[in-house]
Image (cartoon, rainbow, N blue to C red):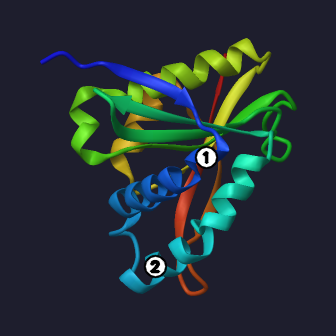
Amino acid sequence: MNTNVSIIKTRKKDAEILREMAITTFRESHGHSASTEDIGEYINAKFTLENIEGELSDDSNVFHLVYVNEELAGYSKIIYNTAYENLTKDNSTKLERLYVLEKFHDLKIGKQLMDFNLNIAKQNAQSEIWLYVWTENYRAVSFYQKYGFRQIAETNFQISVQHSNPNWILSMEF
């Protein structure tokens, strides 16, 4: 089967599509990390149409949608020149989101989307890239380690008022 992959910069008109993808991929990757109520609380707070439109209106946020044979498969969000406390350089890119629907995992779409983001970060004079990753998302941790990311810190990712997940902050210099 031929697989045609395209990565397209997200525009403001894509807000609803992006919102739906964000909700679905968050549930797929984190839905089992907390109660249904806690996951719902996070989604209802973070993935409102108003919030997504606000993120898309902020020029510092760079979103891309990835399509496989014209079917939406995932998305990414990076932010240039965003240092993590005093542990990364000022010209660091934060990889805030990189999500691919489970049904596309075997096609290595995440790798293509990651490579794309690394290339555009380098083209924009960034010296490194960093991210948060849930410590129990073993697939994601392994994925980033294969790229050469190293752990630089730990934090808790607040899912709801009563639940947080332990996260590592990983970084990779170019």
Label 1 to label 2: alpha-carbon separation: 25 Å
Q: Residue furthest toward the left?
A: 1
Q: In the figure, residue 27 lies in which quadrant?
A: bottom left
Q: Which residue is mark 1?
A: 13
> Image quadrant for the N terminus?
top left
Q: Secondary structure at mark 2?
A: helix
Is residue 85 found left or right of 104 in the rendered image?
right
Residue shown at the point (59%, 21%) measured from the top left: 118
Q: Is residue 80 above or below residue 56?
A: above
Q: Can residue 134 be seen? A: no
Q: Residue 70: image x %, image y %?
A: 33, 30
- Judge by depth and name the residue closer to the eye, 84 or 44: 44
Badge nearest the viewer, 1 or 2: 1
Q: Which residue is mark 2?
A: 40
Name the residue type under label 1. Answer: Lys
Residue shown at the point (58%, 25%) measured from the top left: 117
Q: Residue 147: image x %, image y %?
A: 48, 23
Q: Is residue 28 above or below residue 128?
A: below
- Judge by depth and name the residue closer to the eye, 153 or 90: 90
> Image quadrant for the C terminus?
top right
Residue shown at the point (40%, 43%) measured from the top left: 140
Is residue 154 found left or right of 19 in the rendered image?
right
Q: Earlier in the sequence, mark 1 or mark 2?
A: 1
Residue shown at the point (42%, 22%) measured from the top left: 6
Q: Residues within 10 Å of mark 2 (few under 14, many from 20)?
A: some
